[in-house]
Amino acid sequence: MRMNAVLLVSLTLLSVSCDEDDAQPKVEPLTASEVKDLDATSTSKFTLYSFNSGAVVANADSASAKWDIGFRGTTIILNGGVSGPGVASGQIVDGIFDEIVEAPAAGYNQDSNTTKAIVGSGGWYTYTGTASVPNHAILPNAGKVLILKTAESKYVKVEVISYYLGNPSTGTAEFADLASRPASRYYTFRYLYQADGTTNLQATE
Amino acid sequence: MDYACEHAGASKYMIQLRFGWLIILATSLVVIQNATGQDSIATKNLDAVIVTATRSERALSELPVPVTVIPASQIRNMGSLRLNDVLVEQTGMAIVSDHGTGVQLQGFSPEYTLIIVDGEPLIGRTSGTLDLTRIAVGNIKQIEVMKGPSSSLYGSEALAGVINIITDRPSGTSGNITTRYGTNETFDLGASLNLTKSKFGLYVFGNHYRTGGYDFDPETVGQTVSPFANSTFQSRLSYKLSDRTQLTISGRYFYETQENASNIGTTTVPLVVDGTGDVTDWNINPVVTHKFTDRLKTTFRFYGSKYGTNSRLTYQQDGALYDDTYFDQAFYRPEIQAEYFFNERNVLSLGVGRIWESVEATRYDDRMKYQTNYVYTQYEWQPLKRLNVLAGLRFDDHSAYGSQLSPKLSLQYDAAKWLAVRASYGVGFKAPDFRQLYLNFTNSTVGYTVLGSKMVEDGVKLLQEQNQIQSILADPSTFGDIKAESSRAYNFGFRLKPLERLTANLNFFRNDVSDLIDTKAVALKNNGQQVYSYYNISEVFTQGVEADVAYSIAGGITISGGYQYLDAKDKTVLDQLKEGTVYARDPGTNMTRRVSEDEYGGLLNRSKHMANAKLFYEHEKTGWSATARIIYRGRYGIADTNNNNILDADSEYVDGYATINISAGKTFTRWLKLQAGCDNLFDYTNKSYISSLPGRLIWASIGLTFAGRSTMSNN
């Protein structure tokens, strides 16, 4: 068994290196970006974001396909379905951000009246309530990666890292104390945007 | 989780608190008592007569199953008051708090250990825990703890083991009164009376216990453990109808009341509710034994018991009712048992019985009932002089969830005078309880709903008709019938006596548990809360080794030590870890990483290491006695804090700790005994995570004994 596994791995490595040799010049560098402390504190308007431009989109453009994703408190919307004029859809995939190298072919949902494509509680985050420490905290679930098809049908993978200003450690006494806990509704997330329309989400070195 | 509690909302806190301080009190007291007990057991009681293993009196040394016996003398020397005080000092037994004070055996939660008094089960569990502080120890002759499943004899609940409390029985004519006072205004008064006259015997026991509780956080409303008081009356009457026939009637009555206050508002805008809660339980147990011949002995037993709680909380501001809940449980069981002695080496027992159980409570639609018919058989066989075999089989047919077959086989081989080898295999089960079948509860403040498995289909349908359901998360019809939780258990061990004064016990155990009942969300309500129900899911195992050593030095000194290593894990989680699908966030950077298998700490609330060391001194001539006991509980998981539902991060553990308990006493002229002690000598507390462990407790007691003719032997 072990022998076979080793053999298999070597073969795979071999074929990968062959591919790389063949496809040398045409790969655009693909790297993950991190957005720090995106302000989602408004209680009325969503903070809209475009992965293509890598910037916040003005609310005046909310009726366009210029934005892909919107944040307001713990609610995440995608530009499609009931949330916007675009065709954006998405799903939550279990795994580690760096290890997800290919977007799934199917399983994407658009926002509907009853459920958002990116489910909040039990989806991308857990509200701790009083059952566990720290109390009353929004903690992004580990191993949950958002795979989205943007308003322009491009694939992007997103991981929410923090919901609090400054991406604080959530294990400290300072965080546990509601009086000294940093402000909430500030998103830190990382994403990798594939502009060529393929499902390849593997970062280049 | 809150919804697991069978009692209604607010009373839960009360119960928890009450238990908490009881535990504390009991712990300190018990610590003292236990230490004494264990030493004596290990040394003097190798040939103690026990009944738990066979339901008849048998010599401990001949039984092929691991049984710990804690005699009254130990309990008294330690100064224990409640059962949890005694058990906390025993090897491999952790006292845990979950809606009451329960005991963990071989890594199993309290709901999997059957607690019986003179062979009959105590009823009244809250969220699975039977509160051990309900049991006074002043009238206990000995406590027998049989580890490993015994469903082959006792049926449901005897999955981790059985704790049998053997109470005093009428002998001679004597009386005793003992009173004690200690820290936290804890007062205990106990009295017993023994009367025997030719064919007639009577034993009466009464106990009153009262404590002011304690408070770790005086700034908040309500105490960590609120004041409570309880009373216990127990009696046993025996009458010899003929040389071959004896009648015994036992009865017990218990009543407890506790004050309660809590803040349901916020720190800045308090909203205080307060009130009282009470617990009542009673039972009656007439037994007739008749010897048809010298070889055929029969026992006719009837057992009836009731348990009830009431809790009423009102707003302090205006006296308006906040919560009023009740819980009533009843249990009736007739049973016939016959034993046939073919010869000294072959004994066959046969038993048949029926159990009626019912519950009526705020959280149930109607009075819920179920019945169990059962039959069991047991064969004790000594094929060789050095080999003892005990084989048992029981069949339970339950009206609500189906039937269960529980076999058990145990062997003991006396390899040498100083060495006995024991092995056993058994199947244990725990029937789904009323809560898991019939609960219909909606939390009024938070808004979630919990439905028993029999209620879920109709319950969800009704909520849908009322337009309360946003989406269905799991098909309610798939919840259907839940099965009994069951366990296959292996025990293997040695009993050693390498020196005249040195004894040792070693036991390896492994329990494979399947169909553990868990809760799962069925539907999402419009208020954002979920509807939960019960279903069979988890497979877990517990395994480990337990060791006890005792050495008695001349002059009445005994030293002993005990240790348990425990490994208790969820097999589903282990599979996920192997697949690499469990993740955690780095507490510093919040980046996700994969959790490896060796980071998994297993089930919550289990200590990998537990140990004790004890010293007992008893000098009959001078009447002096003394004990010193160190009880260590290794670190254990308290909660998942890094949000991946398993125990893995260091911050998810409670530190290990040790408590030291001491006691000393002197008996004057055989009728007066003075005793004093200190539990938790170094005042160890963990206010955030172990609210059930009070600080240092100092106590003193006076006991008077009056004896008639030739009755001093009783203890």
Image (spheres, rainbow, N blue to C red):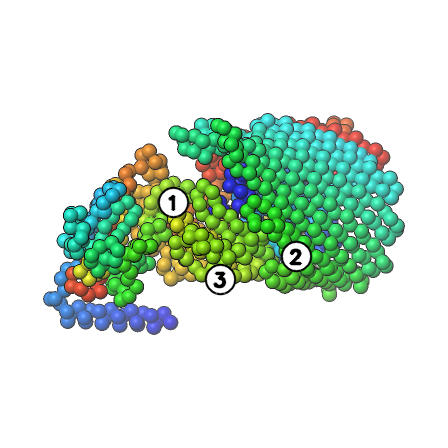
Q: In which chain is the residue bearing label 2?
A: B
Label 3, label 2: how many angstroms apart (C-alpha)? 24 Å
Q: Secondary structure at mark 2?
A: strand
x and y percent of residue B285 in the render?
74, 47
Mark 1 = which residue?
A128
Task: State whether residue A158 appears in this view.
Answer: no
State the residue in front, B527 or A181: B527
Residue B477 numbered mark, or none: 3
Cβ–Cβ under 8 Å for marks 3 and 2: no
Give the spatial CA distance, label 1 vs label 3.
30 Å
For the residues labelled 1 and 2, the Cα–Cα distance comes to: 41 Å
The local crowd at label 2, few if under 14, some if 14 to 19, many if 20 or more residues have their Cα within 10 Å, is some
Name the element at disc 3: helix
| Secondary structure found at label 1 | loop
Q: Is residue A13 left or right of residue B394?
A: left
- Name the residue: 56% across, 49% down: B364
Q: Nearer the viewer, residue A105 or B625?
A: A105
Q: Amino acid at mark 3?
A: Ser
In percent of width and height, residue B193 lies at 78, 35
Which residue is tagged 2? B371
Q: Are marks 1 and 3 on the same chain?
A: no
**Residue at position x 47%, y 36% in the image:** B686
Residue B52 shown left or right of residue A37 in the figure: right
